[in-house]
Image (tube, rainbow, N blue to C red):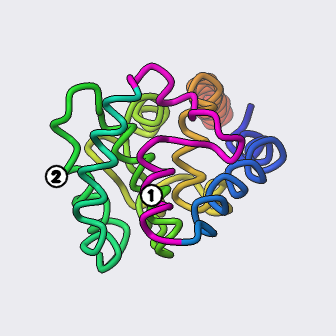
Amino acid sequence: MTFDEIVNDYIDEYRDDARAEMRFFEIQRSPSAAIRKAALCELPSGKRHPHQRRIPRTVLEQVEAQLQGIGRKLAKAADFAALHRLVERETGNTKGIGALTVYDISHRIGAHFGKAPRHVYLHAGTRTGARVFNIRGESFDPKILPKAFSRLAPSEIDDCLCIFKDDLREGARAQTVRRKSGWVAAVRRRCT
């Protein structure tokens, strides 16, 4: 798959569900309700999000209590990055809570407060997808990606890098082969 095909596939198959999920957190009646649903990793169906299915409920309840305690700070966070730092500082050392869960909870709470990520945050599968582009670190500006990804919001790029990590590797290999074979053909033309 080319990068354009991967982005098209994401838009066709995943975008609507991802937006509906964030809308669920956005429309919660109160900040405390949004924090509760986000921390307990509840989907609109009432089930737990698959990313956090293995985390014991008692751990998620502890995270909720911690985040309810800083609810006003979360509401006043200047932007998503500040909100993410607050969630990470408050819950990141909790046993069983890793970078993916910190990001997911931050993203859900951010939806309620109108604070969307401006950068792509790396964790789990997203990190694997980003390696195709030699990207390392904790987060990155989405503008450094190939043009095909400009049609996606940073949170959608996060999903796309994770969902399509294997396709991205194959696509990058194919593009490298095409570049190399194109270069070889150009060199041959010049040499004959």
Asked whether, in this view, residue 103 is left or right of residue 129, the answer is: left
User: Which residue is painted at 18% across and 51% down in the image?
Assistant: 90
Q: Nearer the viewer, mark 2 or mark 1?
A: 2
Asked whether, in this view, residue 83 is left or right of residue 153, the answer is: left
Residue 156: horizontal and vertical position, in percent?
60, 52
User: Which residue is painted at 44% across and 58% down in the image?
Assistant: 144
Residue 57: horizontal and vertical position, in percent?
41, 28
Query: What is the three-letter code of the residue carrying label 2?
Result: Arg
Q: Specify whether residue 192 is in view.
A: no
- Which residue corresponds to mark 1? 144
SS for dot 1: helix
- Which residue corresponds to mark 2? 89
Asked whether, in this view, residue 80 is left or right of residue 62, the answer is: right
Instruction: Report, in whole angstroms, how far the alpha carbon at label 2 lies from the one at label 1.
Output: 28 Å
Query: What is the three-letter code of the residue carrying label 1?
Result: Ile
User: Which residue is painted at 66% across and 33% down in the image?
Assistant: 182
* Numbered circle sitting on residue 21: none
Q: Is residue 98 above or below residue 20?
A: above
Does the magenta-highlighted stretch encompass residue 35? yes
Q: Quadrant of the C terminus?
A: top right
> Looking at this view, is 115 or 133 the one in front?
115
Q: Which residues are magenta?
A: 30-56
Residue 150: horizontal and vertical position, in percent?
62, 62
